[in-house]
Image: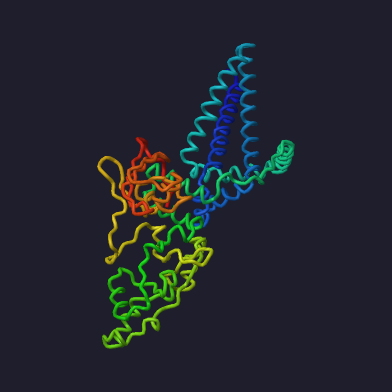
Amino acid sequence: MLFEDWIALAFVLFCIVLAFFFSASETALTAFSRARMLQMEKSGNRRAALVNRLIETRERMIGAILTGNNVVNIAASAVTTGLLLSWFGDVGVLYATVIMTVLTVVFTEVLPKTLAINAPDRVALLAARPIGILVRIFGPMLVGIEGLVRWILKLFGMRVGTDQAFLSAQEELRGAVDLLHHEGSVEKSDRDMFGGLLDLRELTVSDVMVHRTEMVTVNADEPPEEVVRAVMLAEFTRIPLWRETPENIVGILHAKDLLRAIQSSDGDLEKIDIMAITLPPWFVPDIRPLSEQLKAFRRRKTHFALVVDEYGEVEGLVTLEDILEEIVGDISDEHDVPVPGVRPQPDGSVNVDGAVPIRDLNRVMDWSLPDAEATTVAGLVIHEARSIPDVGQSFTFHGFRFNVLRKSRNRITALRITPLGRKPPLAKAG
């Protein structure tokens, strides 16, 4: 073999190595974690900063990589063909085609891309500096190529950089967390908290409020001793007071203020002026997003508000705890009365109180029942059935069977829910 042949073989090997590098760099610089790279840049990693700068001009970076990759691949194929022609004659073209196809597919495509996709951040950091130099070298040419590509795409009605993402940033974050949970990297409780935090902008006060039928209220026209007895029997510290009708809320009585008044009156309950120690009620619209209500609670430094509809009628009440529970799950203290609203059965079914919120049931059972049209499980059944069902009726929708167990007048008080022999899909977080 001549000395020139050895030089040609060395050149082909060098081109394959460069093609390996370009393929790995292309995959890594399009698959790395931008969030992790941004955090590394904030920590002072210069290579991470270079990676982030490269991705800002993605079209130019891809153009530089593809230009380099095609140049070395074409050069390696041409030299190999010439070398094998000199050795084997015309049949050398066939040999060169087979050899370069195998080398290109295995060593310059599959192998480097597989390596890069398994460690994209590490490969991106290693490739950032050489690719940055390549972009600067090919700069003028890449600007021309980029302009030509944009012009061609414009002919087909496509404008680079103007199309909106198919998913919103919140949906992408939710999808990423659901995927990590599915892979076992994120626990269910953490996924639920993250999903609940994202849901604050989508949920309104009416989605988490305590309905007026479940509110504990006291008639302010009752004698002071009756008011004190009612407050002491309640498990809450803030009690709405009403006059004439339960919907006419005139104030909020705090148990701590009542205790101070009892102490000031030396235990003589008749001397207590209940209305003098009540706080004025704060009314908020039922359509206010939870994120805004949370800010309002912090701004007013209070934890309690009454919810009204568009006609000004009281619909229920909402507390800071109700909003926090949407993020962290159920919060119980030593005074909470345990209400077993969700009771799993040995046969795989679940007995559920009709007033249980759909979001709470989804969170507990890891289900994905829709909550857009109804807030409670009973409301979902009525919405889907388009009627108020009777005891004993069954309905099947959304992959579950709903059996009505108990009913009080027009209210469904208990149901049995049975999954229909399939693994429920990933629940929407929150």
From the top left corner, tell me how far across and down residue 163 is, in percent.
Answer: 64, 45
Residue in the picture at 39% in, 64% down: 321
In the image, 3 versus 283, the foreground residue is 283
Where residue 72 sits, quadrant-wise, is top right
Q: Residue furthest left?
A: 346
In the image, 198 versus 247, the foreground residue is 247
In the image, 148 versus 404, the foreground residue is 404
Residue in the picture at 39% in, 50% down: 378
For residue 401, above or below residue 354: above
From the top left corner, tell me how far across and down residue 33 is, in percent.
Answer: 50, 46
For residue 334, above or below residue 45: below
Q: Is residue 249 left or right of residue 65?
A: left
From the top left corner, tell me how far across and down residue 78 is, in percent.
Answer: 65, 23
In the image, 178 versus 415, the foreground residue is 415
Q: How is the image coloured?
A: rainbow
For residue 107, above or below residue 301: above
Residue in the picture at 48% in, 70% down: 283
Where residue 233 sits, quadrant-wise, is bottom left
From the top left corner, tell me how far across and down residue 124 is, in percent.
Answer: 53, 43
